Image: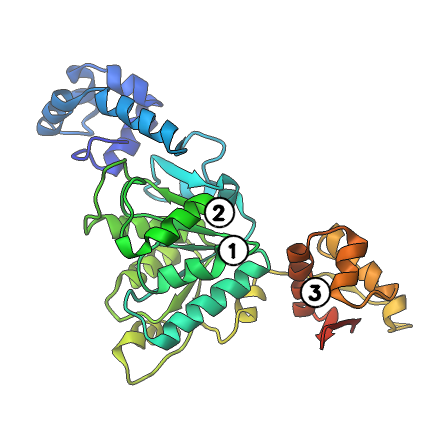
Amino acid sequence: MSLEKISIKQKNMLLEQFESPEVIFSLSSEALAKTKIIDQKTLNYFFKVRSLDKAKYDLSYMEKNNIQLIPRCDPEFPESLANLYVPPLGLYAKGNLSLLQAPLTIGIIGSRNPTVAGEKYAKLFSRSLSSVGVTIVSGLADGIDGKSHWGSVNELGGTIGVLGTGLDICYPRVNKKLFELMAEKALIITEFNLGEKPLPNHFPQRNRIISGLSQGVLVIEARTKSGSLITVNHALEQGKNIYVIPGDIGGTKWAGGNQLLKEGAKLVTNPNDILEDYIVFDQTVNQQNESAEQSALKMATPDEQLLFDLIQKGYHTIDELVACSGLPINKVNSLLTMMEIAEIILIKYGNIVLI
């Protein structure tokens, strides 16, 4: 994954032809020249710097700091990233790797210098979505990215931060506390090697991973020319859904998002506007008797069915459902929220009833 003067596209082409880095490392100059993938100047660079010293140092550092390398051929490597036009060669990762296989992921992007309203929406939407099991993906930058991670890091769905640097560098430094918390409780990833600094060209490259991991991308407060719109372009090329929170039509900070709305992005004003595109509840109602007791409802999961049955039996508070179901309270809250969205239940003043 190293060798900065060889492009990621060239590295991918070499891997497709020779299958493994070990084979490429062992090739002669003549054999590499015959591929016509890299020119003579780059070949000279390759053989000048070819050494395992840095790799040995990096492996030692990774072992000491619980960093894992997931190559593209690894079963844990996300299929959505493997299918990109120019996929990452691999991912350095620290934290909860299971988040890479999360069933529903939403990217949240926006300004690095947001208004108070933008910050509020980032926290609100990320917390609400993650509380029902959605994994939030963002870039761990200052502003909307950071607020989105803070909103979701302690929730059920968790969060993934995609860096534009090596995993040993926290950028920006203002996010150091968040960086450390996510490495412990959530997940941070990057395709860049240890020691690689936050160069300007890294962030557009990073953005394709944010959109690649996400099934939909939410834009909060973006200018007409911004990194957020680069991520949107990647998402559109990948066939992903685009969501936008509308903003002040007289302000430049919201102009990029408002333009996306003109071009057909989905306008959202609450998290349910996003969830309704992904969460499907199959309900078959007995038309001859519409009472809840006689309704035949097929829940999305066995746990939802368990809660439904308990509510039917007369357990109408969260404490009662936790005690009788044996499920943790955060799981019960998540399931009840999903059932309320699907209009199966109504929660009023702490009392849960079937609709």
**Local secondary structure at mark 2:** helix
Query: Mark 3 sits on what residue?
Result: 339
* Percent position of residue 159, x then y: 47, 52
The alpha-carbon separation of the residues under discs 1 and 3 comes to 22 Å
Q: Amino acid at mark 1?
A: Asn
**Local secondary structure at mark 1:** loop
Residue 145, quarter of the rendered image: bottom left
Earlier-in-chain disc, 1 versus 3? 1
Earlier-in-chain disc, 2 versus 1? 1
Query: Mark 2 sits on what residue?
Result: 185
Q: Quadrant of the C terminus?
A: bottom right
Q: Is residue 46 left or right of residue 183?
A: left
Label 2: few (<14), some (14–19) or many (≥20) C-alpha neighbours in 10 Å: some
Q: Is residue 80 above or below residue 314?
A: above
Residue 88, quarter of the rendered image: top left
* Percent position of residue 144, x then y: 36, 64
Residue at the (38%, 59%) spot, across then down: 236
Residue 109 in view in this figure: no
Front-lying residue, 142 or 340: 142
Q: Is residue 276 above or below residue 160?
A: below
Residue 9 in view in this figure: yes
Query: Mark 1 sits on what residue?
Result: 154
